[in-house]
Image (spheres, rainbow, N blue to C red):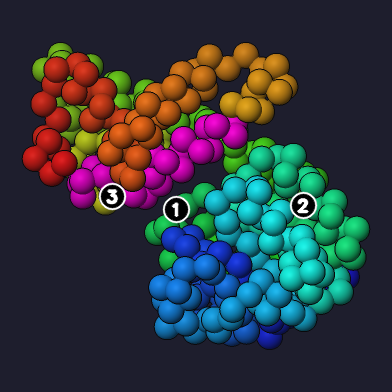
Amino acid sequence: MSSPIPGDATVGFIGLGHMGGPMAVNLAKAGYTVRGFDLVPELLAEAQAGGVTPVGSVAEAVDGAEVVITSLPNGRLVLGVYRGDDGVLANAAPGALLIDTSTIDVDDARTASAEATAAGLRHLDAPVSGGVVGAAAGTLAFMVGGTEESFAAAQPILGVLGARAVRCGDSGAGQAVKLCNNMLLAIHQIGVGEAFALAKALGVEDQAFFDVASVATGTCWALNVNCPVPGPVPASPANRDYQPGFAVSLMNKDLGLALAAVEKNGVHAELGKHAGQVYGALNEGDAATKDFSVVYRDIAEKSGLTTGTEATR
């Protein structure tokens, strides 16, 4: 049961969107037999062009599959495709390894694991970091919850899909780490945006501030990679009208999950709550589909500053 997944294994892949589609294609390119299912015909066609075999149902995707990967928007959908006569639990091969790469509630992840175990299957919650670019390049980072045996078995699959996988603990731990990380990331991105706005208001050029902060104590991913102003980091979303990347709507969703956990566990998290309010407001407008670094533009405009991005809105 704990032996690594063989290189000729059949993989059922459910959810072929911005993240799932590239991951499924990378597995097909690596030699796995990948049967993919999605409700959107265009996504099935894109995956098929990359070597994935499109199928018409969850049951057909996972029938006899040794590995089942899900990449879905929320826990309700994950549990929905697991359950029922046509679901994953009823149709996957005995002892199959289920890897859920969705970002969902910790309790939903633990429920999925318990139901999989009861059905004689193995389960990992394995949310990812790295965005669409990382999914396409196979450089994702996985935060994994589950048994040591299941984590070891998944290494060949995770090695194709990402550059790093860390077992964070037992069931639900991967989701817990993902939510904590993204709450921190949201706080960082807001802080970086406010710092650039203050520097601009004080007459400091964006590049000058970046050149110092990026190598000083203010350094962080939200500054060095996802720099929210055009110029200093040419590959950042700010240089292409904040095309995501990681959209505001997704950050808002993850913050909602994180803050629900904050409330449930009685954690004092004032900055996390403030970040939730900021991204909740952004999510109500046109910025919902922009990269979450667009928060800088909102800060700058409320500060009466010219950002250099207004003409591309």
Residue sitting at x 31%, y 30%: 295
Task: Locate the N terminus by quadrant.
Answer: bottom right
What whole-number distance in Å separates the C-alpha atoms at marks 1 and 2? Answer: 24 Å
Nearer-N-terminus badge (2/3): 2
Residue 1 is one of the magenta-drawn residues: no
Amino acid on which the number 3 mark rests in the picture = Gln
**Which residue, given by chain and number where applicable, does mark 1 sit on?**
131
Reply above or below: 136 against 291.
below
| Rendered view: 22 above or below 238 | below
Q: Position of residue 258 (x, y in %)?
A: 59, 31
Question: Which numbered marker is on residue 112?
Answer: 2
State whether residue 129 is above or below residue 180.
Answer: below
Q: Which label is found at residue 243?
A: 3
Q: Which residues are magenta?
A: 238-258
Determine the residue located farthest toward the front in the rendered image.
Answer: 85
Mark 2 Cα within 10 Å, few/some/many (few <14, many 20+)?
Answer: many
x and y, in percent, of residue 64 in the image: 77, 81
Q: Main secondary structure of the magenta part?
A: helix
Please determine whether, in this image, residue 169 is positioned above or below residue 193. Answer: below
